[in-house]
Amino acid sequence: MKQSPGVVDLLGVLAYAELSAYARMTEDAATLAPSLADRAALSELAVAEYAHFRLLRDKLTELGADPDEAMAPFAAALDAWHAQTRPADWLQALVKTYVGDGIANDFYREVARHLDPVVAKLVDEVLVDEGRSQFAVERVRAGIEADPAAGARLALWARRLVGEALSQAQQVAAARPELALSLVEASGGQADISRLFATLTEEHNKRMAALGI
Amino acid sequence: MKQSPGVVDLLGVLAYAELSAYARMTEDAATLAPSLADRAALSELAVAEYAHFRLLRDKLTELGADPDEAMAPFAAALDAWHAQTRPADWLQALVKTYVGDGIANDFYREVARHLDPVVAKLVDEVLVDEGRSQFAVERVRAGIEADPAAGARLALWARRLVGEALSQAQQVAAARPELALSLVEASGGQADISRLFATLTEEHNKRMAALGI
């Protein structure tokens, strides 16, 4: 079964995103968590990301694609994003998980919707929230309550996360113009791209409000 | 239900060992694996360690112990062991997983046997091999075949792993004399301690032979 390159690209970038999120969250948990219970709680979310990676890799194999080849074009951009956004403390790590992954997941979900219903269903499944929001929101709000100055710093941090994500996304689009083009075509042209960005912005603002920053 | 401190100590050290092995293997996979397939294969083993951590933590809770308190006394020694034995390349990472965790697991299994049959069963369950041996042995042997000089370097590395493990174990014993004492008593005295070390050495030598180093 031969799939459109758009589907393989989407599953490939998403698989690598999950694999690298798993590694990064594991490291943040081990190095930044203020208690063993917090460390276990963030590790639990990391392991869930790994399970998503497994689903996506198996789907790629099922579609006749080589998972490593499908992921490879996106590894450098996603690694660069993690290198540019290494959290300095526990609250930054939580905001990264919630805000950074949140906007990326909204993007993947919107793209999948335009591509193929079966793939869209799988993508929805792997992007399920799994308590990440509640975990991050509760702890970040408590952190800001204990130290009100942290709120302004975390708001800046969240803006930087989004800026770096856009910069990496532009580099992927420049390196793979056919992917960018198929996205524009699949979504019905320029007007829908504008709507996509409006949706992403709106959801992002909701998350910022939930954090109280 | 109040358990003997020996049982809580053993489950505590083992839980932290699994939690830290999971984090370390995840990092080694992300930074040292030569391919995405190898990275996924080692990550798979790391995630299995996390599942073992979960079992041990739940058992501690079931026994009425606080998992964080049970793990805390051992965190510094196990963190120090990982810091002292940070692998420099992929083959060192595999040897660490196979030889280092191998000798530690033999030790935990022997201790558990003397403590309590129910706990011994759980410990046997979490220390199941899960393909780690085959994965490491195959890749290390292939690595040495491709570069025979690697064999001697890895043999030195394995010796260092064991040396650092003994040094950390001694520090734990010095910091928690009642644990060391209960181990000696549970195992029937000094003669059995000698037999324990003979068993550990024998199993270690078998692993070195399997790697061809």
Image: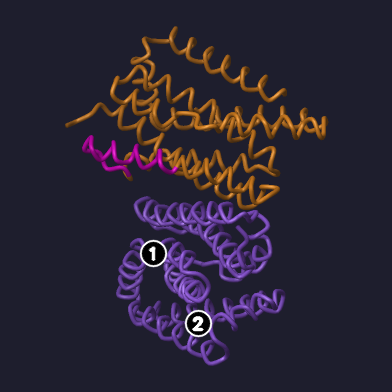
Chain colours: A purple, B orange
Q: Quadrant of residue B140?
A: top right
Q: Report crowding for label 1: few under 14, some 14 to 19, many 20 or more residues within 10 A (C-alpha).
A: few
Bin the neighbour count of mark 2 within 10 Å (Cα to Cα): few under 14, some 14-19, many 20 and up. Answer: some
Q: Which of marks 1 and 2 precedes in the sequence?
A: 1
Q: Quadrant of the C terminus of chain B?
A: top right
Q: Are labels 2 and 1 on one chain?
A: yes
Locate residue A27 relative to residue A176 in the image: left or right.
Answer: left
Query: Disc 2 and disc 1: Cα gap in Å?
Result: 24 Å
The residue positioned 38% from the left and 26% from the top of the image is: B177
Identify which residue, B88 or A13, lies in the foreground: A13
Relative side of A115 to B87, left or right: left
The kind of residue tagged 1 is Val
The chief SS type of the magenta part is helix
Residue visible at 34% across and 28% down in the picture: B122
Label 1 is found on which chain of the structure?
A: A
Residue B148 horizontal side relative to residue A151, left or right: right
The residue that disc 2 covers is A159
Q: Is residue B159 magenta?
A: no
Number of marks in the image? 2
Q: Residue furthest left?
A: B1
Q: What segment carries the magenta color?
A: B50-67
* Residue kind at label 2, given as amino acid type: Arg
Residue B104 screen position, x and y as percent? 50, 28
Residue at image mark 1: A128
**For the residue labelled by badge 1, is the local secondary structure a helix, a strand or a loop?**
loop
